[in-house]
């Protein structure tokens, strides 16, 4: 009797989960699998009369493309992800630490800090593109008035500075995410631990590295992993600010994937870029989780 | 008696159903913007009032996804009777067998004779068959801030491209944040360099396209000279930031007076009029090249009928109405593009205005030879991106002109 009710319960669970699985399958897994198929096909909107499998031709093309060199795009992507992530994390962590202790107006302050996270990436890109404008931009104006520079800087037209400019915007955009997540984790650290540490004579720095960071490590690992994936798949800001230019200096895998589809109408090569991104991220996630779990963390 | 009444009732019902049969036409627009959709909706309701048996269902996907939506709907034979086509999408729709050849309709369309030469070219772009009725034409003219020129001691307007370059360089003074020319550095920047460089090449006039896989002139002395002039213009009359300028930056530089010369389509006129005093600037035809003429490219949008539509006659009747001189003039007057009929430039007050007249002059003058790009070539998709990267490298000094021209020559061969 007991067994029967158990299977009935299981059945019920399966029934209520079916819509969710269907939804995920239809809108997430089906497009991904379809995309992988297309990456092996000759699939251009320009001529859909011949959409045969062309083996690895799309991949060969993206690796040997002389106009958009894969090595340069990959290098740009790594710079974009690593530097953005590093600064987003450090600044987000500092903000979270500052907001941990209650103070007057904390609610308003938190709202202001979290504000960028609520905006669309494309809109942010458009706004910052004007702020960074080499002729009318407010940033040039402020730097000139402060006497820090003598002539306008072409933030988005100088290939050496353009990447830094778009990364600055991305950092500004991404800090709140870390601040929100780390603040929540910080608030879960029991106060007794700090009190005990104080009695043992540990200073703030020692407390940070010996109590706070180890305690919130699972959150740190999951958030940095998530953000790496998101930043790599986040072309909005670059697309709005430089469109990958000047001269490919800010072109990353995600913007190039969009270019292949919107400008070249080549869904085959666009999907191939997508598959490359998935492969890189999967490898990264596996290695990252292996390393972090080896160090004695089984929570992830 | 009862049976008879019932029979009569049934008959009446049947008749009333067959008489009140309305046809619904699905119409997909692609150049979507809120103002344009509203304009089209107003025009549609006018048409529906005049034709009570027709209902038109306007589908307006967001601009960024519209071309893909059109492709998807056509390729899956979804219910569609009227579809907007752009110069960029025409070839793929026809390639995939989704557009009706409108030749037989054109034969009995009295307004076809009234189409401007450019509009006619647009209609017959592919295989010399009309797959679309042109609705909007986009060509370029020169916008000039006369007030800024006067402040800098210049009282004449440039008649040749060389004069334009000379004046632009002459008035440039970076210390006053005064530059000469409104550069275009991204998003279809090739249309600008091609305009300057191709004007030097006499033989293009015999070709169908400015360049194509059949014929190109990149490595000729003439084209090279044109490119050198264009690069000189950048180095001596444009702020370095120009490398990254798109449409918005162009409009801003011109309106602020920083760069008094701007080359743009007519849809920039209403926008600029909103931002500044319209008496401070004028629009003139593009200056002529050293051989006495300039090659101008033209863009267009039009409407066509999907090959599988079941309401082709009704669709054609609406298209005919929508693109009659009166309605097309009204539409473009509010939308900002150029109308497709000759008579509109003579009858519509709006297009007699000197700013639009510049475009009208270009379309009738022998100094302007209209050439299109090889939009039907498989080399075409992505060319704008490749050109953009090469041009930016060139302007930034990362490569040299000779190498770039060789590369372009190889690309088109």
Image (spheres, coloured by chain):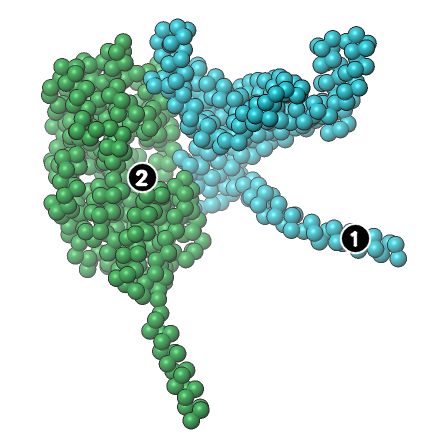
Chain colours: A cyan, B green
Expressed as whole percent of the image width and height from the top left, the position of residue B347 reads 12, 47
Q: How many marks?
A: 2
Depth check: B231 or B52 in front? Answer: B52
Q: Is residue A18 above or below residue B195?
A: below
Q: Is residue B212 left or right of residue B2?
A: left
Q: Is residue A132 above or below residue B339?
A: above
What chain does mark 2 sit on? Answer: B
Please tell me whether mark 2 sits on a helix, a strand or a loop: loop
Work out which residue is located at the far bottom of the displayed protein and give it: B1
Expressed as whole percent of the image width and height from the top left, the position of residue A61 reads 47, 31
Q: Is residue B340 left or right of residue A238?
A: left
Please tell me whether mark 1 sits on a helix, a strand or a loop: helix
Alpha-carbon neighbours of circle 2 within 10 Å: few (<14), some, or many (≥20)? some
Q: Nearer the viewer, mark 2 or mark 1?
A: 1
Query: Pointer 2: what residue?
Result: B375
- Quarter of the C terminus of chain B within the rendering: top left
- CB under 8 Å between discs 2 and 1: no
Is residue B202 something one can see in this rendering? Answer: no
* Same chain shared by disc 2 and disc 1: no
Query: Pointer 1: what residue?
Result: A9
Q: Is residue B339 left or right of residue B390?
A: left
Identify the residue at horizontal 36%, vertical 43% (top origin). Answer: B34
Depth check: B296 or A4 in front? Answer: A4
Identify the residue at horizontal 79%, vertical 55% (top origin). Answer: A8
Identify the residue at horizontal 35%, vertical 64% (top origin). Answer: B23
Depth check: B318 or A288 in front? Answer: B318
Is residue A135 something one can see in this rendering? Answer: yes
- Quarter of the N terminus of chain B within the rendering: bottom left
Q: CA distance from mark 2 to mark 1?
A: 62 Å
Q: Is residue A87 above or below residue A35?
A: above
């Amino acid at each position: 009797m007991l067994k029967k009710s158990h299977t009935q319960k299981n059945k019920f669970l399966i029934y209520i989960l079916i819509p969710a699985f269907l939804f995920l399958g239809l809108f997430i897994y089906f497009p991904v699998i379809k995309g992988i198929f297309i990456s092996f096909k000759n699939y251009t909107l320009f001529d859909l009369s011949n959409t045969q499998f062309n083996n690895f031709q799309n991949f060969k093309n993206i690796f040997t493309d002389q106009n958009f060199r894969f090595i340069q795009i990959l290098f740009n992507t790594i710079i974009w992800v690593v530097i953005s992530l590093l600064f987003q994390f450090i600044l987000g962590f500092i903000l979270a630490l500052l907001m941990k202790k209650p103070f007057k107006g904390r609610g308003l302050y938190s709202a202001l800090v979290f504000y960028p996270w609520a905006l669309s990436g494309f809109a942010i890109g458009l706004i910052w593109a004007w702020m960074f404008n080499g002729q009318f931009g407010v940033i040039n104006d402020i730097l000139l008035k402060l006497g820090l520079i003598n002539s306008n800087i072409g933030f988005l037209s100088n290939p050496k500075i353009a990447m830094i400019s778009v990364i600055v915007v991305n950092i500004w955009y991404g800090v709140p995410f870390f601040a929100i997540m780390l603040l929540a984790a910080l608030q879960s650290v029991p106060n007794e631990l700090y009190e005990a540490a104080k009695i043992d004579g540990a200073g703030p720095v020692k407390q940070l590295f010996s109590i706070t960071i180890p305690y919130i490590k699972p959150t740190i690992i999951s958030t940095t992993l998530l953000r790496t994936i998101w930043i790599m798949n986040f072309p909005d800001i670059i697309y709005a600010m430089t469109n990958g230019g000047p001269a490919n200096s800010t072109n990353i895998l995600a913007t190039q994937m969009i270019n292949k589809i919107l400008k070249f109408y080549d869904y085959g090569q666009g999907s191939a870029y997508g598959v490359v991104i998935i492969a890189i991220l999967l490898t990264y996630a596996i290695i990252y989780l292996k390393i972090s779990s080896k160090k004695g963390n089984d929570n992830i | 008696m009862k049976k008879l009444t019932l029979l009569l009732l049934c008959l009446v019902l049947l008749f009333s159903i067959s008489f009140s049969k309305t046809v619904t036409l699905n119409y997909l627009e692609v150049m979507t913007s809120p103002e344009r959709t509203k304009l089209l909706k107003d025009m549609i309701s006018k048409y529906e009032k005049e034709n009570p048996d027709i209902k038109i269902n306007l589908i307006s996907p967001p601009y960024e996804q519209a071309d893909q939506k059109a492709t998807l709907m056509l390729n899956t034979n979804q219910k569609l009777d009227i579809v907007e086509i752009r110069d960029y999408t025409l070839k793929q729709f026809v390639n995939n067998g989704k557009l009706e050849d409108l030749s037989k309709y054109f034969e009995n369309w009295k307004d076809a004779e009234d189409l401007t030469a450019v509009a006619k070219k647009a209609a017959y772009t592919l295989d010399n068959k009309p797959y679309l009725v042109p609705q909007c034409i986009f060509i370029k003219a020169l916008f000039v801030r006369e007030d800024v020129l006067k402040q800098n001691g210049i009282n004449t307007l440039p008649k040749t491209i060389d004069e334009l370059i000379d004046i632009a360089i002459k008035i440039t003074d970076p210390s006053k944040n005064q530059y000469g020319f409104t550069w275009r550095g991204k998003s279809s920047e090739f249309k600008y360099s091609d305009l300057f460089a191709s004007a030097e090449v006499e033989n293009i006039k015999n070709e169908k396209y400015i360049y194509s896989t059949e014929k190109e002139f990149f490595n000729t002395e003439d084209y090279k000279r044109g490119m050198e002039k264009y690069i000189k213009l950048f180095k001596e009359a444009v702020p370095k930031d120009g490398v990254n300028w798109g449409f918005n930056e162009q409009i801003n530089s011109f309106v602020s007076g920083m760069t008094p010369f701007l080359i743009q389509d007519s849809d920039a006129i209403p926008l600029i009029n909103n931002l500044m005093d319209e008496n401070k600037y004028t629009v003139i035809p593009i200056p002529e090249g050293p051989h006495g003429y300039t090659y101008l490219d033209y863009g267009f949008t039009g409407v066509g009928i999907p090959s599988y539509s079941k309401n082709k006659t009704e669709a054609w009747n609406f298209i005919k109405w929508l693109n009659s001189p009166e309605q097309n003039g009204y539409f473009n007057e509010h939308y900002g593009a150029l109308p497709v009929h000759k008579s509109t430039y003579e009858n519509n007050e709006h297009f007699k205005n000197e700013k639009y007249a510049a475009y009208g002059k270009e379309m009738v003058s022998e100094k302007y030879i209209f050439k299109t790009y090889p939009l039907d070539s498989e080399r075409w998709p992505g060319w704008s991106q490749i050109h953009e990267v090469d041009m930016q490298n060139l302007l930034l000094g990362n490569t040299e002109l000779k190498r770039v021209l060789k590369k372009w020559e190889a690309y088109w061969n």
